[in-house]
Amino acid sequence: MFNKIENEVERIARPIVEEFGCDFVDVEFLKESGEWYLRVYIDKEEGVTLDDCTKISRRVSDELDKIDPIEFSYYFEVSSPGELKLIEEEKALKRAINKNVKVRLNDENYTALFGKLVNFSENNIVLNVDGEDKNIKFDDIYFIRLSGKGR
């Protein structure tokens, strides 16, 4: 269910984010401290401003209200990746071994995989997804980032 919601929100948010000159980084829908949160992460070369987040939040929120993909109450946030910065360097990959990560594939659907980073080499990573190790080539990865609470 969550992947379906995240995919629908991405379909709506990505063009709006790009219209404002930002890069769509990720979307996540998760429960924290008993509350549901829908978060859209954006970035841009010169840094994301509060104004960027506010404008994008209003536009995406208006579009979400039209289709209402989530049946219950939740908090909606738009922000820069902050602590969830992408894992882009070997040193960061080493620190991420045995931690939960989110891998967004570079396919036409930007498929998201959640799992534990087992290992990596020069050309690929090994990601344990639901008890199964998957070898994923770096060329097939759009991004990798740490993922809180197994999501």
Image (cartoon, rainbow, N blue to C red):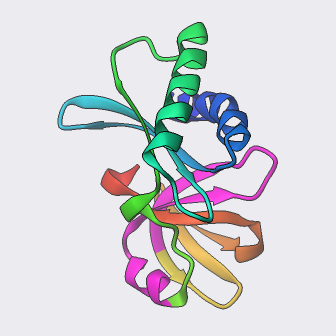
Residue drawn 55% across and 49% down? Answer: 42
Please report the bounds of the magenta region as a residue range: 91-117
Residue drawn 37% across and 75% down? Answer: 98
Q: Please give left or right for residue 11 compared with residue 89 in the image.
A: right
Residue drawn 57% across and 75% down? Answer: 126
Whether residue 132 appears in this view of the structure is no
Residue 62 position within the rendered picture, expressed as x and y whole percent measured from the top left:
55, 16
Against 95, is 127 above or below?
A: above
Against 48, is 60 above or below?
A: above
Q: Please give left or right for residue 99 compared with residue 9 in the image.
A: left
Q: Nearer the viewer, residue 54 or 90?
A: 54
Residue 59 position within the rendered picture, expressed as x and y whole percent measured from the top left:
58, 24
Residue 101 position within the rendered picture, expressed as x and y whole percent measured from the top left:
46, 63
Q: Please give left or right for residue 96 compared with residue 140 in the image.
A: left
Residue 14 inside the magenta-drawn segment? no
Q: Please give left or right for residue 144 compared with residue 14 in the image.
A: left
Residue drawn 63% across and 28% down? Answer: 8
Residue 108 inside the magenta-drawn segment? yes
Residue 6 position within the rendered picture, expressed as x and y whole percent measured from the top left:
55, 34
Q: Nearer the viewer, residue 110 or 98?
A: 110
Whether residue 37 appears in this view of the structure is yes
Q: Quadrant of residue 94?
A: bottom left
Q: Quadrant of residue 100?
A: bottom left
Q: Nearer the viewer, residue 146 or 58?
A: 58
Against 144, is 72 above or below?
A: above
